[in-house]
Image (cartoon, rainbow, N blue to C red):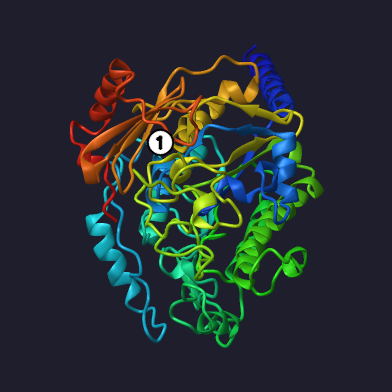
Amino acid sequence: MKQRWKIRKSYLIIVLLITLLWSCKDRPQPPNVVFIYADDLGKGMISAYGQQQFRTPNIDRLIQQGISFDRAYGCMLSAPARASLLTGYHDLRTDKWNISAGGQFIHSDNDTSFIANQEQRINEKDILLSENDLYLPQVFQKAGYRTAQIGKLEWGFTATRHQMQCHGWDEYFGYLDHVRCHGYYPPFLFDNGKIVLIEGNTMPNCGKSIEPESETAYQERWNHQGKTVYSQDLFLEKMLQFIRNNKDRPFFLFHPTPLPHGPVSVTEIDPELSNNPNLTSIEKEYASMVKILDNNVGMIWNELESLGIAENTILIFAADNGHEIYYSQQGRCEKPYRNMQTQQLFDDYTNKYYSTLSGDRFNGNSGLAGLKRSNLEGGVRVPLVVYQKGKIEGGKTSQQLVAMYDWLPTFAEMLQVPLTIPKDGISFWKILQQQTAPKINRYVVFSSFWGPAIVSHDGWKLRYYQPKDTCELFQLTKDEQEKHNVLYNYPEKAEALKKQLLLECNGNWNQGVCRQ
């Protein structure tokens, strides 16, 4: 009798195992995520958004086939933008991260032996999220994903290998130093805890060129002595290999590319631009950096297709902050930025920056006011496109108000990973699933060199301007270029937004003033 029961019990266990395995087989694998995060790329540099001097066919194809968010906000500067994206908190907070100084891994003779001591000093001052408060890659790890960060750096102005491990990266490859990544020919990079030398690259500043444009600057850029291997080529190779290695398991690949952050640096001018009579050499070179980025988007997309995993991969293209000028030259688009008609310097208040006044041939900020570092729309509005073949597509433009710090809760909802500690971000996963989903009533906030600002779901914006200790109110649905301050026309609206913004700043306007 006992023997019969043992046989029956064994049979039941086998049946249960077969049933479990069969159900797992039928269950769809969660989608991979490839997140390409451009640096200082204004919306106006993309041809689908109006760029006239050259084409960006691969990014355009994403826009045509996916969902493009017209009201997406980053931060006014790259370091807080990355920290905000990876923590799910806005950049008015002072208790969620510490942005370290850049350039801490540069040595005159490319010695790397001092780096460990520098990392220790950075780690001692670091602010980590509290226990059970997740970073973005940790959300994916909780769901069984393999995570990788390849490119510029994911934290502050100098990151450490300890931080990369603490934040949840299974693999990483890149600079880990904001100043070094302004040069595209690094003598060494960080590769999963190790420092790897890049043969042929010998310049401690990674080949960073000088500004503004001059004959000396031109000759310096095209002198390739000590500049052999272009960093973006290394990043593309690493990304494609990571995708191949993990094609049979869910993965999250985050690529904060240095492109097209300047100073300008390319190995050659793109053929599409070489004979453009409207552009100077440095403008052609800068546009070629955007073309390299666009080509890389296409190569990653093609790799997903060739491996047969495109339908199960969410492809995201975004940028960290608004446009910046790296192609300034006398009489054309000058730094410090000035109105080329009146020669008056822009102050982003009574004399606001606009491309038509500055001489920017590219109109990189799509006609908006302001550039990077500003709390005007041109400093913080960013491109954002999301695509998944057969699931997130349609060539739609969403008017939903979103911020980069919304991505963490969005992915957490997608992966059903509970967030035990609330984030500032709000999930928009349902909008990605259903393009007809109702809009989320909310607001976004961000800091700047001038002060903080707040934008509401219905298009109202209040910005603080610290030099004059005053606020401006704009109705963006009617005045996207922020030309008409209606503060005194709508005092109740202004007071309501001011109250909410001060709450986010803990009652102190200066908390929203970035002093990097």
Q: Mark 1 points at which residue?
A: 88
In the rendered image of this protein, does residue 405 appear above or below residue 320? above
Determine whether, in the image, residue 449 is placed left or right of residue 177.
left
Say which residue appears at 38% left-offset and 42% top-offset. Answer: 375
In the rendered image of this protein, does residue 16 appear above or below residue 365? above
The image quadrant that residue 344 belongs to is bottom left
Q: In which quarter of the image is the N terminus?
A: top right
Residue in front for this viewpoint, 172 or 481: 481
Q: Residue 46 at what x, y percent from top left?
A: 65, 48
Q: Quadrant of the C terminus?
A: bottom left
The amino acid type, in three-letter code, at marker 1 is Gly
Q: Residue 422 at what x, y percent from top left?
A: 35, 26
Tell me if mark 1 has few (under 14), some (14-19) or many (20+) residues whose alpha carbon lies within 10 angstroms of its own.
many
The image quadrant that residue 437 belongs to is top right
Determine whether, in the image, residue 56 is placed left or right of residue 449.
right
Q: Residue 512 at what x, y percent from top left?
A: 27, 41
